[in-house]
Image: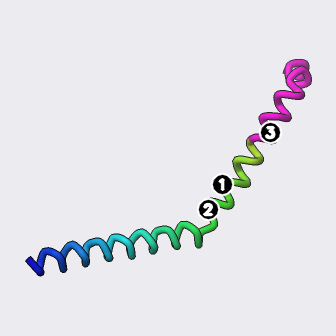
Amino acid sequence: MDGIFFFVGFWALSLVVLVLIIRNAIDGSKSAAKMDVLIQEIRLLRKDIKNNKHIIDKKV
């Protein structure tokens, strides 16, 4: 019975360590911050296109 508790505890601890390593790697790559900047740029472009649609239509 003690072996099962040891195995489950070791498995849970390994899972937590793995999650922390993956989370640290994602945060370290700064991809989330880059994605936020990209999303903001896309929103600004959409707003600009929406406001200047008549200019785009005349050029085309």
- Magenta residue check for 57: yes
- What distance separates the C-alpha of mark 1 from that of mark 3? 15 Å
Earlier along the polypeptide chain: callout 1 or callout 3?
Answer: 1
- What distance separates the C-alpha of mark 2 from that of mark 3? 21 Å
For the N terminus, give its image quadrant.
Answer: bottom left
The picture quadrant where one finds residue 29 is: bottom right
Estimate how packed mark 3 is, as few (under 14), some (14 to 19) or many (20 or more) residues with alpha carbons within 10 Å: few
Q: Which kind of residue does numbered mark 3 sit on?
A: Leu
**Residue matched to label 2:** 31
Q: Secondary structure at mark 1?
A: helix
**Residue matched to label 3:** 45
The picture quadrant where one finds residue 53 is: top right
Relative to 6, residue 42 above or below: above
The picture quadrant where one finds residue 7 is: bottom left
**Residue extent of the magenta highlight:** 43-60
**Residue matched to label 1:** 35
Q: Is residue 16 left or right of residue 42?
A: left
What secondary structure is the stretch in magenta mostly built from? Answer: helix
Q: Secondary structure at mark 3?
A: helix
Asked if the residue at tag 2 contacts the one at tag 1, i.e. Cβ–Cβ closer than 8 Å, the answer is: yes
